């Protein structure tokens, strides 16, 4: 069983999503000692955002010399994702959606013919044999029925993205209201860490 662990927060040791994603991985490691774990820090070593040259290369055009290393890194990320049985992602909300570093990674794994394809019935996901667990942190409260729910483009976006490639039931552990005040932050982090420790590990 291969586990891929990704973090995308730019806050380093001050990050709540990093703290919770690490707790999730610890829980899964404890359940299966010796589990093969790969780690990527998308904030420390970010991928470049896609350009027209990237898209041309994806269509078979020669890869420009200046892009060769980045295209190779993107291919490595795709291969790593395809090889993983479990993917754990730390994803904070920045301005109502995911960090751009995580978006750059998503752009490298949503590849026609690899993780999805178009057919007579529409889109067919090809990566449905994975378990995806996402640790999310949000400064306010964006749950269903809240005034800010319409602005929630973190969890809703990731549910759609992973569903698009065949992962219909991604799991989310959230720490909400971490910027409301110290008490809210402490309670949110404690609740998320408890959820991580109680996670179904199979």
Image (cartoon, rainbow, N blue to C red):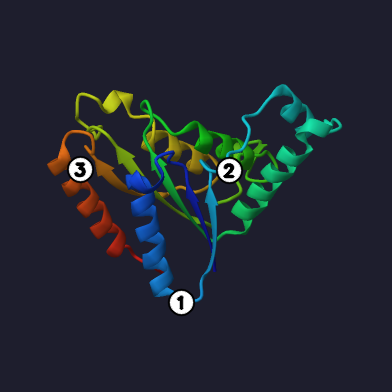
Residue found at the very far left of the displayed protein: 183
- In whole angstroms, how far apart are the C-alphas of marks 2 and 3? 28 Å
- In whole angstroms, how far apart are the C-alphas of marks 3 and 1? 32 Å
Query: Which of label 2 and label 1 is nearer to you?
Result: 2
Q: Are marks 3 and 1 in contact (CB under 8 Å)?
A: no
Q: Is residue 187 left or right of residue 64?
A: left
The residue indicated by pointer 2 is: 45
For the C terminus, the quadrant is bottom left
Residue found 73% across the figure and 28% down from its top: 55
Q: Is residue 115 left or right of residue 184?
A: right
**Which label number is shown at residue 185?**
3
Q: Is residue 172 visible?
A: yes
Residue found 63% across the figure and 45% down from its top: 115
Count the numbered circles shown: 3
The residue indicated by pointer 1 is: 33
Coordinates of residue 152 in the picture (x, y in percent): 33, 29
Q: Is residue 59 visible?
A: no
């Amino acid at each position: 069983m291969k586990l891929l662990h990704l973090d995308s927060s730019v806050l380093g040791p001050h990050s709540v999503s990093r703290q919770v994603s690490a707790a999730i991985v610890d829980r899964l490691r404890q359940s299966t000692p010796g589990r093969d774990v790969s780690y990527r820090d998308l904030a420390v070593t970010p991928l470049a955002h896609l350009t027209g040259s990237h898209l041309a290369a994806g269509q078979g055009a020669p890869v420009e010399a200046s892009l060769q290393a980045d295209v190779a890194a993107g291919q490595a990320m795709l291969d790593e994702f395809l090889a993983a049985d479990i993917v754990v992602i730390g994803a904070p909300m920045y301005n109502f959606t995911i960090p751009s570093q995580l978006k750059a990674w998503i752009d490298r794994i949503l590849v026609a013919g690899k993780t999805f394809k178009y057919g007579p019935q529409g889109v067919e996901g090809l990566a449905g044999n994975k378990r995806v667990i996402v640790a999310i942190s949000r400064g306010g409260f964006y749950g269903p029925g809240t005034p800010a729910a319409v602005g929630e483009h973190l969890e809703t976006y990731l549910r759609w993205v992973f569903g698009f490639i065949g992962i219909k039931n991604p799991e989310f552990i959230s720490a909400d209201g971490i910027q409301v005040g110290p008490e809210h932050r402490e309670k949110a982090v404690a609740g998320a860490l408890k959820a991580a420790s109680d996670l179904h590990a199979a």
